[in-house]
Amino acid sequence: MSKVVAIDGPAGSGKGTITPIIASRCHLVTIDTGATYRCVALAALNNNLSIDDKDKIIELSGKINIEFDDQGRVYLDGEDVSKRIREKDVTSIVSPISSIVEVRANMVDLQRKMAEGKDVIMEGRDITTVVFPNADYKFYLDASLEERARRRFEQNKEKGIDMSFEEVLDSIQKRDYNDMHKEVGSLMRTEDAIYIDTTNMSIDEVVEQMINIIEGD
Ligand code: DC
């Protein structure tokens, strides 16, 4: 039986940093589900679609090819878009795009297929609730809004993405609201997910706590 570690949490809670570290230490394949929604958003931009072109976005989400390699790079129709999908224009439309129920159905299918027959660590917003509610290990990572914005601001600087701290804070706040108020697949903390507030924790501390749980039995 393959193993599934599911992690949910809001933007900047540490999922994206911690997941690949645990993956490499516990020999799991990483699946960044946010990247799949970001690919749909980028494909929409590439096709000059706006968020109002719902039917066309749904059609596109069923047609595009999304792949990850074992280095965590993301490919949209064969092109490496790992950096492009983190840019401001994609980030600003990804949450409303991920609210489209039919887009979610297509992405959830894809995410489950990506996990088939593998030991995986999957992170996103609805992994513990919708994609793998029966995962072997379920975590919900959280942190204060200011700390999450600070982390994302620093990450953006490293990646050469030009956004002020206020822009990042505003963008995260809007996405939090959107991500928690979806018709389907809203970000939710369930009782059976282990809750970790990472606000005052180092990356190492979070990793150790999670690995103790994953490897503790
Ligand atoms: O984790 P991220 O910031 O790359 O995710 C981008 C967006 O995709 C996020 O605002 C919400 C959405 N998302 C989702 O709806 N469900 C997931 N499982 C993962 C991400």
Image (spheres, grey):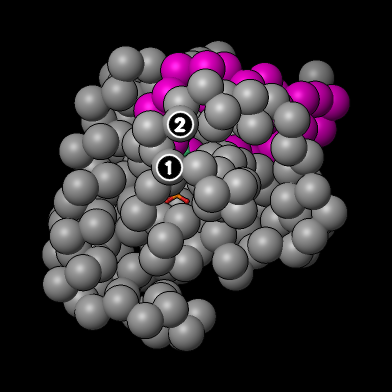
Q: Quadrant of residue 202?
A: bottom left
Q: Is residue 8 visible to us here? A: no
Q: Quadrant of residue 105?
A: top right
Residue type highlighted by circle 1: Ser
* In contact (CB < 8 Å): disc 1 and disc 2: yes
The range drawn in magenta is 97-124
| Number of callouts | 2
Local SS, label 2? loop
The CB of the residue at mark 1 lies under 8 Å from ligand 1: no
Image coords of residue 90 (percent x, y): 46, 56
Q: Which mark identifies residue 173?
A: none
Image coords of residue 192 (percent x, y): 37, 20
Does 23 sit left or right of 99 as displayed? right
Residue at 32 percent of width and 16 percent of height: 183
Does 159 sit left or right of 149 as displayed? right
Residue at 30 percent of width and 35 percent of height: 179
Residue type highlighted by circle 2: Asp
Q: Is residue 23 visible to us here? A: yes
Q: Quadrant of the N terminus?
A: top right
In which quadrant of this rendering is ligand 1 seen? top left
Q: Which mark identifies residue 50?
A: 1
Residue neighbourhood size for the residue with mark 1, other residues' Cα within 10 Å, grouped as few (<14), some (14–19), many (≥20): some
Residue denoted by label 2: 53
The CB of the residue at mark 2 lies under 8 Å from ligand 1: no
**Camera-side residue: 94 or 156?**
94
Residue at 24 percent of width and 57 percent of height: 171
Where is 109 relative to 156, above or below?
Answer: above
Q: Quadrant of residue 125?
A: top left
Image coords of residue 35 (percent x, y): 57, 48
Q: Quadrant of the C terminus?
A: top right
Residue 103 belongs to the span the image colors magenta: yes
Local SS, label 1? loop
